[in-house]
Image: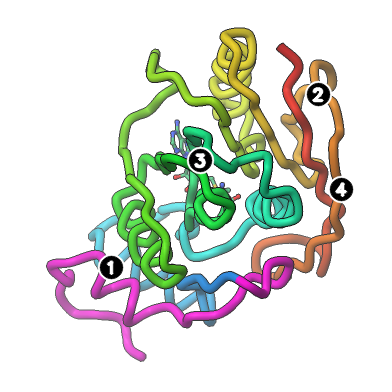
Amino acid sequence: MSVPAAPPSDPADFIREWTVVAPPPLCPELKLHLAGPVTPLWEATETTLAETGLPPPYWAFAWPGGQALARYLLDNPGEARGKTVLDFAAGSGISGIAAARCGARRVVASDLERFALAAIELNAALNGVAIETCAEDFTAGGVEAFELILAGDVCYERAMAERVWPWLKSRAGAGARVLLADPGRNYLPKAGLREIARFTVPTTLELEDRVERETFVYRIAP
Ligand SMILES: C[S@@+](CC[C@H](N)C(=O)[O-])C[C@H]1O[C@@H](n2cnc3c(N)ncnc32)[C@H](O)[C@@H]1O
C-alpha cells in the first residue's frame, strides 16, 4: 500500500483500505478494523487530512481499557442487557459493540474524530449490531441520560483526564452506572474508584512500552 496522493472522499473507504479485519486479542468473538503496520497508516492519515503532527489514529486500535470493558460485559451480559448505554470516547467502538451484543436497548458511541465515527459504523456492521454514533463532546455539558456509561482508556493525557473525570463523577452522581477501564495511566484519579474486574491485556509495542498490561475495570462511586 502506498500513501494516497489525494484525500479519499469517504473515511469508510480509507478505513477499508488501510486496516485489516481481525479479532481484538481479549475478545476473539468480535471483529474490528484494526491497524496493520502502524507507521504507514499514521502517515496516510496525516496525508489524507493534510495535517502533520497528528496523534496516532486511535480508532484503529482496541486499547487495553476498551478491551477490558468489552470482555467484562461479554462475561457479564446482565450489566448491559435492556439498558441505554453510552460508549464515551469510543475509538473503534469495541465497548459499545460488546454492550450491543449483550442486548442493550440502545447504544450510542461518541467520539470527536470523524474517522472514529466511520470506524465505529463499519465495526458495528462487521459484528451485526446497531450503534448510533455521535460527535458531541458530552463533557461540555451534555445532559442526555444514559443508564450505563462506558469509558475505556480516557486518562492517558492530563488535559483529557481533568475534563473527563468531573463529568463522569457527575453522571454517576445523577444515577448512571459508570464503568471506567484503565491500564494504569498516569492521570487516573486515585480516589472514587471501586475495582470490579481485572484482565491481562495483550498490547502492541507500537503503542505501549510492554507486550501486555494489567487493566482494571472500575465502577465510579456516585
Ligand atoms: C485511547 S482512545 C480509547 C478508545 C476506546 N475507548 C478504547 O478503549 O479502545 C481515546 C479516544 O477518545 C476520543 N476522545 C477524546 N476526547 C473526547 C471527548 N471529549 N469526547 C469523545 N471522544 C473523545 C479520541 O478521539 C480517541 O478516539
Q: Which residues are magenta?
A: 1-29
Badge 3 residue CB within 8 Å of ligand 1? yes
Residue situated in front as seen by the camera: 59 or 210: 59
Q: Position of residue 133 (x, y in %)?
A: 33, 45
The amino acid sitting under disc 4 is: Arg
Quarter of the image for residue 78 reads top right
* Horizontal side, residue 15 vs residue 202: left or right: left
* Horizontal side, residue 126 vs residue 169: left or right: left
Q: Are marks 1 and 2 in contact (CB under 8 Å)?
A: no
Q: Is residue 38 magenta?
A: no
Image quarter hosting the N terminus: bottom left
Q: Position of residue 62 (x, y in %)?
A: 60, 61
Label 4 CA crowd tier, 10 Å (few <14, some 14–19, many 20+): some
**Residue 47 — which label?**
1
**Residue 186 — which label?**
none
Separation of marks 1 and 2 at Cα, in angstroms: 40 Å
The amino acid sitting under disc 3 is: Asp
Of pointers 2 and 4, the one earlier in the residue sequence:
2
Q: Is residue 162 visible?
A: no
Q: Which residue is mark 4?
A: 198
Q: Nearer the viewer, mark 1 or mark 2?
A: 2
Of pointers 1 and 3, the one earlier in the residue sequence:
1
Q: Callout 3: helix, strand or loop? A: strand
The amino acid sitting under disc 2 is: Leu
Q: Callout 1: helix, strand or loop? A: helix
Q: Which residue is mark 3?
A: 87
Q: Which residue is mark 2?
A: 193
Q: Are marks 3 and 2 in contact (CB under 8 Å)?
A: no
Label 3 CA crowd tier, 10 Å (few <14, some 14–19, many 20+): many
Q: Kindly give the residue lying farthest to the bottom in the view shown.
A: 1
